[in-house]
Amino acid sequence: MKTPDLMHTIRHRVYFCDTDAGSVVYFGNMGKYIEMGFTEWFRHYAESLQAMNKRHRIFFVVKESHQHFRKSLHYDEEIQITTALKNMKFYTMTFTTTVTVNEEVRFIGETTLTPIDPVSSLPVKLPQEIMQLKVIR
């Protein structure tokens, strides 16, 4: 089901440890920025992932991720990580992540998460209060 735009933006400074020898962010670190984005999205619209784990006995795993690199990110740049809920079904949530520097889009990614039971590692339905986000907004 298509959801209304539920967006959240965080700011982050690129650290030297995120870059290669040329002071360019290593592509593998984009996953870290994606995770920072959706983690703070959950905290803003629902609750922390840790609280959700304790209360609902679920853990989110990445089911699928697509990444489009438009332009490099560099050491010491301040980036804005905007995460928007694109789609939600009973067993999945798909987020779009956009990373910008001074309003210039440098990266766009799409990531699908699925909740699992941490004991059995089997997929479980999203908690009801998460499903209600598509109705409330």
Image (spheres, rainbow, N blue to C red):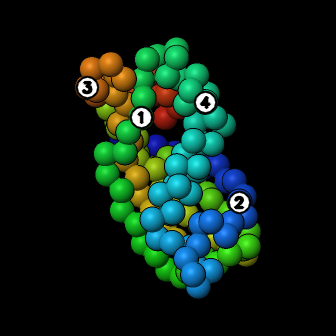
Among the 4 quarters of the image, the one containing residue 12: bottom right
Which residue type does callout 4 highlight?
A: Ser
- What distance separates the C-alpha of mark 4 from that of mark 2? 19 Å
The secondary structure type at the circle numbered 3 is: loop
Point 28% across, 26% down: residue: 121
Which residue type does callout 2 highlight?
A: His
- What distance separates the C-alpha of mark 3 from that of mark 2? 34 Å
- What distance separates the C-alpha of mark 3 from that of mark 1? 11 Å
Assess disc 3: are there few (<14), some (14-19) or many (≥20) residues with their C-alpha within 10 Å of its C-alpha: few
Q: Nearer the viewer, residue 10 or 6?
A: 10
Assess disc 1: are there few (<14), some (14-19) or many (≥20) residues with their C-alpha within 10 Å of its C-alpha: many
Q: Name the residue furthest top.
A: 55
In primary-sequence order, the first of circles 4 and 3 is: 4
In primary-sequence order, the first of circles 4 and 2 is: 2
- What distance separates the C-alpha of mark 4 from that of mark 1? 12 Å
Image marks 4 and 3: residues in contact by CB distance under 8 Å: no
Which label is found at residue 48?
A: 4
Point 69% across, 53% down: residue: 10
Which residue type does callout 1 highlight?
A: Phe
Image marks 4 and 1: residues in contact by CB distance under 8 Å: no
Above or below residue 78? Residue 134 is above
- What distance separates the C-alpha of mark 4 from that of mark 3? 21 Å
- Is residue 105 shown left or right of residue 78? left
Find residue 26 and report its horizontal and vertical position in percent.
51, 72
Assess disc 4: are there few (<14), some (14-19) or many (≥20) residues with their C-alpha within 10 Å of its C-alpha: some
Which label is found at residue 12?
A: 2
What residue would you read off at disc 1? 60
What residue would you read off at disc 3? 122
Assess disc 2: are there few (<14), some (14-19) or many (≥20) residues with their C-alpha within 10 Å of its C-alpha: few
Find residue 57 and report its horizontal and vertical position in percent.
43, 17
Point 34% across, 28% down: residue: 116
